[in-house]
Amino acid sequence: MTRYTASHWGLYEVEQDKDGPRLAPFRDDPDPSPIGLHQLDPSLDRSRVARPAVRRSFLEGGPGTRTDLRGSEDFVEVDWDTALDLAASAIRGVKDKHGNASIFAGSYGWSSAGRFHHAQSQIHRFYNSIGGYVRHMDSYSLGAGRVLLPHIVGTMDFVQANHTSWDVLEEHCELFIAFGGVPAKNAQVNSGMAARHLVPGGLRRMAEAGTRFVNVGPVSDNLDTGHAVDWIPIRPNTDTAMMLAMAWVLETEGLTDPAFLDSHCTGYPTFRRYLLGEADGQPKTPDWAEPITGVPADRIAALAREAAAKRTMINGSWSLQRATHGEQPFWMVITLAAMLGQIGTPGGGFGLGYGPANLMGSNNPRLPGPTLSQGQNAVPDFIPVARIADMLLNPGAAFTYNGMTRAYPDIRLVHWAGGNPYHHHQDLNRLREAWQKPETIIVNEQFWTATAKHADIVFPATTTMEREDIGYAAREANMVAMDRIRDPFAEARDDYDIFTALAQRLGAEETYTEGLTARGWLERMYEEFRAKVAMQDIDVPSFADFWDQGLIDFTPLARPVIMMEDFVRDPAAHPLTTPSGRIEITSAAIAGFALADCPGHPTWMEPREWLGQTARESGTMHLISDQPMRRLHSQLDPSPWSRDGKVNGREPVVMNPADAAARGIADGDIVEVWNGRGRCLAGAVLSDAVMEGVVRLSTGAWYDPDPETGRDRHGNPNTLTLDLPASGLSQGCAAQTCLVHLSGPVNDAPAIRAFDPPAFFAAE
Ligand SMILES: Nc1nc2c(c(=O)[nH]1)N[C@H]1C(S)=C(S)[C@@H](COP(=O)(O)OP(=O)(O)OC[C@H]3O[C@@H](n4cnc5c(=O)[nH]c(N)nc54)[C@H](O)[C@@H]3O)O[C@H]1N2
Ligand SMILES: Nc1nc2c(c(=O)[nH]1)N[C@H]1C(S)=C(S)[C@@H](COP(=O)(O)OP(=O)(O)OC[C@H]3O[C@@H](n4cnc5c(=O)[nH]c(N)nc54)[C@H](O)[C@@H]3O)O[C@H]1N2
Ligand SMILES: [Mo]
């Protein structure tokens, strides 16, 4: 009987050899990812949290003691009961004195795969069982997109799961225009599990069938079809201007589909006045866009004409909206596709986006997977997820969100499980300052991440390898019974057990556990799923049989997908969920919010930091902090696979040879990347795949601030990024809007300490 386990990067078969268990790629996966194969590597143990640990002055003085020492002080290892009692008493103290609205357990992050031991679900369920917590809205992934899209076409989840499938694209798509590529490196991943990796094969078959690919973006190595791809380098954050100029060509040369704009869209005439310059005196011509984008006017015009002449798919990567005014490029992708009138046709329309995960383009069924109920949250307060530092620094201050004005809560206690804010948040020096405000910070972690090192109480959590679970994600080919592969490391416990022990102390054990063991929950969640799919006439085995056989294969249920096909065929019978039921090229709702940084239709506005400013002359470069090739965010950075990608032990910073030469930097040098917000070291890699004026430093190198200088020794780009919202509409993360300087080589670079545990104080 084959045993299986799964992660966000793959489904694995567990092999037993003389040294113990080993992970092998799933036999039916055509393009397995190497990332997760190293999860059992013994070298990871060095960075694991072995025992509960408490920051020394917190242990001595209680909540609120010397919070300025978070991140630099030593810890004391304690037994489980001591740590649990301390945490329960801190939670009870805040509840009684300030109420649950002073507890932040939004706890954003990817956690691990598995439907039950999903740390986010567990922590939310726990806090709901004791009266609620301040939550977060949206994600770092799609802050601007998630708020914008329901106004324009429908929810992001609807769009994401309805992407036209690769089989249809292969047959019908003639021209594929990608803003920001279709990075196969990103499609290694799917939130929940990637059973069979579909993106590399999908792209390859399209190219073989004759689809022409055009990649618009600051880098060229993010669209691999195995065949030639036309690359149009563009200044970061200026895609909206290029798309507007393409739209101007379509409109002024009679290449739009007026019938579609009339029957399926609202607000085109208002947008058209802006496009033609009737509203603001500036026609959005290719000549106007050239000095903004750096793309020659004739190339913009030619691409617009080609798009009108062919069956064209326009794709936007999620990175486009992780920027100031990040709503605009997404809105423009949809507007351009609407003007071409190809939405709902096989092979034409838009994608948002192909590439960021394995899900988009899959033709496997979209089933309601097994879910753990999180209960009811009695606290109404929330923050847009990327406003964490603002919230901690400005209790009571007002913020806008999707047309509302709300106030930041006054947070006394923060509890994180399954996320790494010292990975994901922008401007880490600002976060460190904000992080001193709460009285108590509790973190459940598997590893001594920077977030764990900045906590007061750290609970060691098990990994996926150390527990049973059910693996599934929408539009994946398989559901999998995940086996327990090894014993828990040292004293690590499941998050479920940690929260059960806290719930016991706070009188909520029955509400939290409902009297079930972890295995009992798996069975209940699975049988609920089985009953739900039975209503769609889909038959799956009983829990016992599923657990025995290990896998369910959904590929016999695969069907070609054409996005918004029903709506396009009959908009009256299948309206969209937007206010008008149509595609909103101008949104009355958004216009009504009267926001200067997000008007009622797609609009070009200068980014806060970009190469069109002073830039090139003063040697400033635009920093792209994209998703890393060799890991998921910060996860498994200490693994051999991730460390093999480092340069002199530092995260690679990739730059054009001309920019390197101008600064006297050679391949392999350790360099310093800096701006007014922070500085970090990184290892130089020279490549023509990055346009001049741009550097790429992928996310996820474990934050490693030098205690003397505050400089990060390892190469975490969030030491440099801007902690400002995309706009007052979404308050989304704007990590891709960031200018930096680069200098080097640095000859006396200190050793990195990121993967070491903190210092421990021994009481005797
Ligand atoms: N500059 C810049 N910053 C970015 C981005 C960018 O493009 N540029 N991208 C953003 C995006 S899109 C995202 S989604 C975020 C990602 O940010 P995160 O999701 O916070 O990053 P991860 O490294 O995945 O953090 C997950 C953490 O959970 C821990 N963990 C895993 N499983 C478990 C478990 O079972 N129990 C417990 N207790 N802990 C567990 C892991 O050890 C890890 O530390 O980063 C954002 N940050
Ligand atoms: N291996 C791996 N895969 C991942 C993740 C990971 O950590 N590791 N994270 C997952 C998560 S949580 C998410 S949200 C998705 C994110 O998916 P995306 O947001 O699509 O990913 P990025 O890698 O940030 O950016 C994609 C490409 O956009 C380009 N780009 C950046 N700025 C601009 C711009 O202004 N204009 C244009 N035209 N292009 C630009 C970058 O060069 C990059 O190659 O990826 C997922 N996949
Ligand atoms: Mo993300």
Image (tube, rainbow, N blue to C red):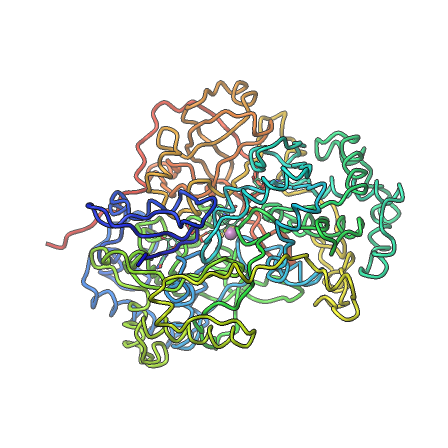
Q: Is residue 39 positioned above or below 553 on the image?
A: above
Q: Position of residue 283 (x, y in %)?
A: 85, 41
Q: Could you tell me if residue 110 is visible in this image?
A: yes
- Number of numbered labels in the structure image: 0
**Residue plotted at (51% across, 37% down):** 676
Q: Say left or right for 11 vs 721.
A: left
Q: Could you tell me if residue 99 is visible in this image?
A: no
| Displayed quadrant of residue 195 | bottom left
| Displayed quadrant of residue 98 | bottom left
| Residue closest to the eye, 678 or 378 | 378
**Residue plotted at (24% across, 58% down):** 488
Q: Say left or right for 485 vs 393.
A: left
| Residue closest to the eye, 620 or 348 | 348
Q: Position of residue 728 (x, y in %)?
A: 64, 57
Q: Residue furthest left?
A: 764
Q: Say left or right for 191 vs 25.
A: right
Q: Is residue 509 positioned above or below 13 on the image?
A: below
| Displayed quadrant of residue 630 | top left
Q: Position of residue 94 (x, y in %)?
A: 37, 71
Quadrant where the C terminus is found in the figure = bottom left
**Residue plotted at (43% across, 73% down):** 100
Q: Say left or right for 251 vs 725.
A: right
